[in-house]
Amino acid sequence: MTERYAVKLYDVVIGYTSLEKADPPLGMVSGKMELENIESGYDFFSVYCKETESQINVDYPDFKFIDAESIRGLNIFNAKDIPIVGEVATIRGFDSDSFEIEITGIPKHDYAALFPAHTEAYENQFKSQLRSE
């Protein structure tokens, strides 16, 4: 079963993600985000990021696309309500498609404890390569 992570702005859940993509050496996880009670992710994040002076890397209003990081109050929690803490959390996406959340710079020790399946899959890819040679 895939773990579900809550995406919160302060104490309000704004969505969920499975953090299904990973790059353990970079301390990175990411995943598609299912927004909760938000009609337009672009409008929501565009307004919120401008009001809180968060870093907007890319903003294309005509396409309803935004890429923003260091969003004040944004946190991701696992099922045990433990925060996933990294150097930077980024949200990007289109209203017409979907939004993704990415956390980079998670310390190695924390990463292994929080994402054992991602860590094991990464380590096993090399073992299987060695066996096939």
Image (tube, rainbow, N blue to C red):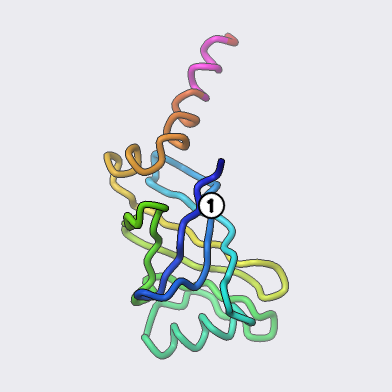
Q: Quadrant of residue 59?
A: bottom right
Q: Residue at x 44, y 29 (%)?
A: 120
Instruction: Name the residue tied to disc 1.
Output: 18
User: Quadrant where the C terminus lies?
Assistant: top right
Which quarter of the figure has residue 131?
A: top right
Front residue (pair 73, 14): 14
Figure check: 70 above or below 16: below
Give the tally of numbered discs. Answer: 1
- Residue occupying the point 69% across, 85% down: 62
Question: Split into 4 quadrants, where in the image is the N terminus?
Answer: top right
Neighbor class of circle 1 (other Cα within 10 Å; few <14, some 14-19, many 20+) is some
Q: Is residue 89 above or below residue 28?
A: below
- Above/below status of 82 relative to 127: below
Residue depicted at x 57% and y 73%: 36
**Residue at 57 percent of width and 63 percent of height:** 33
Q: Is residue 10 above or below residue 46?
A: above
Q: Amino acid at mark 1?
A: Ser
Say whether residue 10 is left or right of residue 14: left
Span highlighted in magenta in the image: 125-131
The percent position of residue 16, horizontal first and vertical second, equals: 52, 62
Residue 30 among those drawn in magenta: no
Q: Residue furthest right?
A: 96
Q: Residue 11, percent across and down?
A: 36, 74
80 or 127: nearer the eye? 80
Tell me the chief SS of the magenta region: helix
Q: Secondary structure at mark 1?
A: loop
> Going by the image, does 4 lie left or right of 93?
left
Percent x, y of residue 66? 56, 76
Q: Position of residue 6 (x, y in %)?
A: 45, 62
